[in-house]
Image (tube, helix red, strand yellow):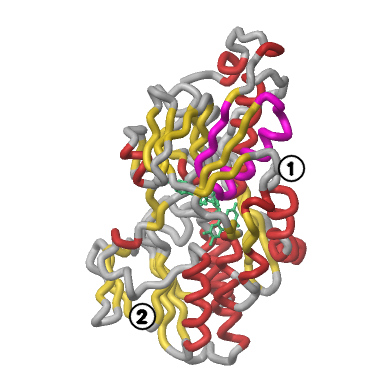
Amino acid sequence: MVAVDCFWSSGRNKAMVDRQRVLVIGDGLGGLSFANKLKLKSTNAEIKVVGKSPKHYYKADGLQIPFQLKNYRQSVKNVRFLLHDSIEYLRDEVIRINPRQKTVNLGSGRTDYYDYLVIATGARLATEEIPGYDGEAKHFYDLQHSMELELIIKKFNDGNLVITVPDTPYQCPPAPYQFAILADEYFSKRNLRGRISITFLSPYKTLFPLAAVSERIESIFEDHNVTFKTGFKTVSVNQKNKEVLSETGDHENYGLLVMIPPHRGQSFISDSGLPGEHGFVNVDPSTLQVKDAPGVFAIGDAAHLETVKAGSATLHQAETVSDIISNELGSDYPVRPYDGSATCLLFAGDKTGARLSTSYAGGTTMSNPDRLGFYLKKIDSDLYFSSLIRGMS
Ligand SMILES: Cc1cc2nc3c(=O)[nH]c(=O)nc-3n(C[C@H](O)[C@H](O)[C@H](O)COP(=O)(O)OP(=O)(O)OC[C@H]3O[C@@H](n4cnc5c(N)ncnc54)[C@H](O)[C@@H]3O)c2cc1C
């Protein structure tokens, strides 16, 4: 493990550092916010972002799009518009990292080299890992599927809406719970609630993994007439019988099935021999540096860390790594080691919102739901596009 202090005061003469090539893989929140932050801090960095999604989508809006609370056009912006002018953007796909040679191979056939490499390739949605998922279960974890769900929900008039979380980790732990609450409000407004039941299947012993937060969500579910089962780890879908099956042989029938897809790292990460579980890269928890790969860091959902996969966590990690690299390149920023912090704003029903916060030190807390939290949640995409992703946080 490399301590932050010795990493950046490694004996170089800061004033004499040559321009260094910083290559960022991934054009999502982590990649773009990191590149913009580093640009603001260092003139000695030649920054290039390689990514395969030139239209950037604000994923948290995936909760609102299915219920027509947001038009998808407000949730998408061109990557070029979000990146500082002097940062190079290459639309391509990384297929392999060669840490010894300090190069990456791209899908187009070219090879790029780096002095520093930041992996920010997020998570892959591995629906194929649940037999019966594809062609039957729905989700709201990318734009295409959120829009598909909007059309399906519009036509869903009666039956059991089942929401299930088969596997961890997944992005934004409170998201599926919010989906259940928003579904109740949507169907109530359409006077369909008498004909539609909502059932939440939780894989944990309690509804939410932390008891104190769980009690609060239970009470919100009660107000919204959402029933739930705990210890239900979904392992497969029987499409013919329209039922989901659990590890212990329990089952639940559905009219409409919404299932959070299992999350895995991108396959090129394990193909490159980088260490990690399920393809998520093992990193030092406070410096985000990849062990035995000099100059290589992983941030955001791509990293294997003992904290949640969330945009707010990603932004803190981008801050730490941009401080470390800019100091290596001659700047003088106080490095804040990453402490596992993440904060998610969530819809808590009846036009209220709450804040869920966590860190490595534990003590996950949920604030009292209030009107301010709701309005902050409603405008969070404005803040995201105008400043957070631009490195100004
Ligand atoms: C429904 C939903 C609600 C959410 N709500 C919240 C919330 O309220 N608060 C919160 O903090 N977080 C929330 N999140 C989580 C947050 O969006 C993610 O944690 C965040 O986007 C992670 O950023 P990232 O850069 O690591 O990954 P991503 O944003 O997924 O970006 C990864 C990028 O890498 C690119 N890429 C992948 N492989 C390659 C490759 N081989 N070569 C080149 N490019 C590649 C992809 O195209 C993509 O653009 C939510 C997520 C979802 C799905």
Span shown in magenta: 21-44
Residue neighbourhood size for the residue with mark 1, other residues' Cα within 10 Å, grouped as few (<14), some (14–19), many (≥20): few
- From the top left corner, tell me how far across and down residue 77 is, in percent: 65, 59
Residue 352 drawn at (x, y percent):
70, 68
Q: Relative to 19, say whether 25 is above or below.
A: below
| Badge 1 residue CB within 8 Å of ligand 1 | no
Which residue is drawn at the image coordinates 71% and 65% (left, top)?
378
Looking at the rendered structure, the kind of residue marked 1 is Met
Residue 254's disc number: 2
| Quarter occupied by residue 254 | bottom left
Up-down: is 210 above or below 103? below
> Could you tell me the amino acid type at mark 2?
Tyr
State the residue in front, 62 or 106. 106
Is residue 141 visible in the rendered structure shown here?
A: yes
**Residues at discs 1 and 2 in contact (Cβ within 8 Å):** no
Is the CB–ligand 1 distance for label 2 below 8 Å? no
Element type at marker 2? loop
The quadrant holding residue 65 is bottom right
Dot 2 alpha-carbon crowd within 10 angstroms: few under 14, some 14 to 19, many 20 or more:
many
Mark 1 vs mark 2: give the one in front.
1
**Residue 45 against residue 365 in the figure, above or below:** above
Residue 333 image position (x, y, % from top left): 71, 24
Badge 1 element: loop
Q: Which residue position is annotated with label 1?
A: 392
